[in-house]
Image (tube, rainbow, N blue to C red):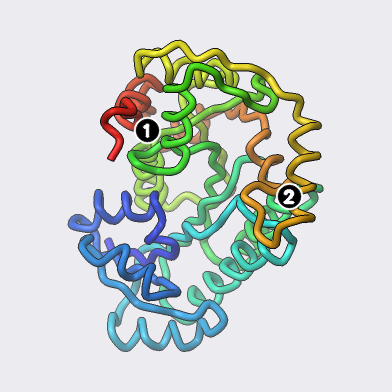
Amino acid sequence: MRWLITGANGHLGRQIVNALGREHEILALVRSESAASALKHLPCQVLRVDYQDPGLAARHIADRWPGAWDALIGLTGTIKGKTASDYHAAHETVSDFLVAISEQVEIGQMVSLSIAGADAGASNLCFASRGAADDRLTTSGRQVAILRLPMILGRDDYASGALMRKGSARWVFSFRVESLEQPIAATDVIKVIEAIIEQKLQGVFSLGGPETLSRRQLIQRAGALLGGTPLVLNLPIALGFAVTALLAWLLPAPPVSPSMLGVLDHDDVIDNEPLLSTLGISLEPLDTTLRRVLKPMNEVG
């Protein structure tokens, strides 16, 4: 198959290219030289594009890589932002670009990764922006599949690294430790994306990992696999929102904003059965995922 991918330079994108780039023809659409460099040694071709000029991007694709493409996969997005415009640039702008490309290049299907909890009517800026971006795709008249996901765990990515540090610590302070998590393996996400394209599914789908457990339980599970017993202590979420609001007021680019904290605090309780039954896929056990992505602190680096 022939795939166009935006966001291929991210953690998940590089894993997709590395896993499937020798099986499928992949053209990564990137916005910068640094993004292109991240894909330099992976099995794909790279085209630098401007999301504000999809016409030019489409002409370059048609001229250099003529013919139809089986899929246009959108991996671009973020939970980290301060203002509505930050999220708009990461979400709605990219969806507009995907739609414009699909109108000028022959595309069999679009697949876009979204966030569990995305809703254009949400008060949270990130959820609202991601939901609006999803709506732009589903109302475009193209063949589209939206896949909404919670925490993704892959080797050497940010989420796995944060979980590894917490699991290796003796004391862990966390906001609302009973918040529900449903982490899914990056390898399972890749498998599902490929199956969605092969089966030409359309619609909005939610997918989580095989278990839903509290944040406290997840950290303790990681700790047990790392040979530790972290004591996880609860901090009230109201304190978290107060601190992040102060940071957003003081800093132009705070490390965590209230919107980002709201996404991280979202309770993930997803029924996987409808989608997995349709695709004929099963998910790997959580402990299998954790053993693969977590490394003892003395192995880091």
Q: Residue furthest left?
A: 22
Q: Residue at x 67, y 34 (%)?
A: 266
Above or below: residue 171 compared with residue 199: above
- Using residue 223 as the reference point, say whether residue 41 is left or right of it: left
Instruction: Measuring from the top left, give residue 295's x and y in whole percent.
Output: 31, 29
Please give the label number shown on residue 247: 2
- Using residue 198 as the reference point, say whether residue 275 is left or right of it: right
Q: CA distance from mark 2 to mark 1?
A: 46 Å
Q: Residue at x 78, y 32 (%)?
A: 239
Q: Helix or strand or loop: what does disc 2 sit on?
A: helix
Q: Residue at x 45, y 74 (%)?
A: 31
Select label 2 or label 1 by which is in front.
2
Q: Residue at x 55, y 73 (%)?
A: 97
Above or below: residue 4 compared with residue 221: below
Please give the label number shown on residue 19: none
Give neighbour class at mark 1: few <14, some 14-19, many 20+ (Cα, 10 Å).
few
83 or 266, which lies in front? Answer: 83
Above or below: residue 61 compared with residue 11: below
Residue 233, by quadrant, is top right
153 or 256, which lies in front? Answer: 256
**Which amino acid, by three-letter code, is at mark 1?**
Gly
| Residue at the spot of label 1 | 280
Q: Helix or strand or loop: what does disc 1 sit on?
A: loop
Q: Pick the quarter of the image with the N terminus.
A: bottom left
267 or 221, which lies in front? Answer: 221
**Which amino acid, by three-letter code, is at mark 2?**
Leu
Above or below: residue 209 compared with residue 52: above
